[in-house]
Image (cartoon, rainbow, N blue to C red):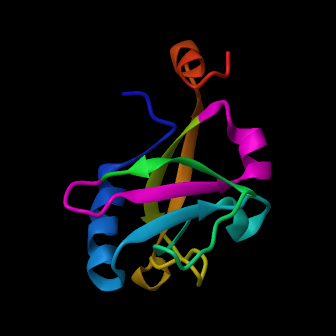
Amino acid sequence: MTTRVDLTPAAGELLACLERTHGPLMFHQSGGCCDGSSPMCYPAGDFLTSDADVLLGTLAPEGVTPIDFWMSASQYEYWKHTHLTVDVVPGRGSGFSVEAPEGVRFLIRSRLMTEEELVAFGLL
């Protein structure tokens, strides 16, 4: 199955821990500089999405409630030809993202989509 967004095993493990504390989760990436270019993880529904956001996909780590990954529509225009992978690294991210107190932060690893992926998503 072709997806626009995936996650690393380490990110999946962290999400399982975070769900035990915060309940079901969601991601939003707004774009811009600093923390805006990082994926932000919130309790599901705490960040209100609108027509100004694009649902890139739903992450389904084992043992975790499915997690929607949203991106601002303006940022999506720049990233629509890329496949994103959510990873986790040591360091402090934004105080608004639920992983911040854990001493780690989520980040995006990206690559250009293959021709097959571009066709599957109607981008070619």
Q: Residue at x 47, y 79 (%)?
A: 98
Residue lying at the far front of the rendered structure: 51
| Looking at the image, residue 57 lies above or below residue 117 | below
Residue found at x 49% / y 80%: 100
| 6 is higher (above) or lower (below) than 49 | above
User: Residue 110: x, y in percent?
Assistant: 57, 40
Question: Which residue is drawn at the image coordinates 68% and 69% (left, top)?
Answer: 35
Of 61 and 47, the residue lying toward us: 47
Residue 47 percent location from the top left of the image: 59, 75
Lateral position of residue 5 relative to residue 113, left or right: left
Q: Which residue is painted at 31% across and 58% down in the image?
A: 12
Q: Quadrant of the C terminus?
A: top right
In screen coordinates, is 109 left or right of 32?
A: left
Q: How many marks?
A: 0
Q: Is residue 73 visible?
A: yes
Query: What's drawn in magenta, residue-wise?
Result: 61-82
Instruction: Pinpoint residue 107: horizontal percent, then vertical percent.
Output: 54, 58
67 or 104: nearer the eye? 67
Is 79 magenta? The answer is yes
Judge whether residue 39 can be spotted in this image.
Answer: no
Would residue 9 appear left or right of 32 to someone viewing this image? left
Where does the image place residue 64, in percent across and percent down from the top left? 26, 63
Is 100 included in the stretch rendered in magenta? no
Q: Is residue 57 above or below residue 64?
A: above
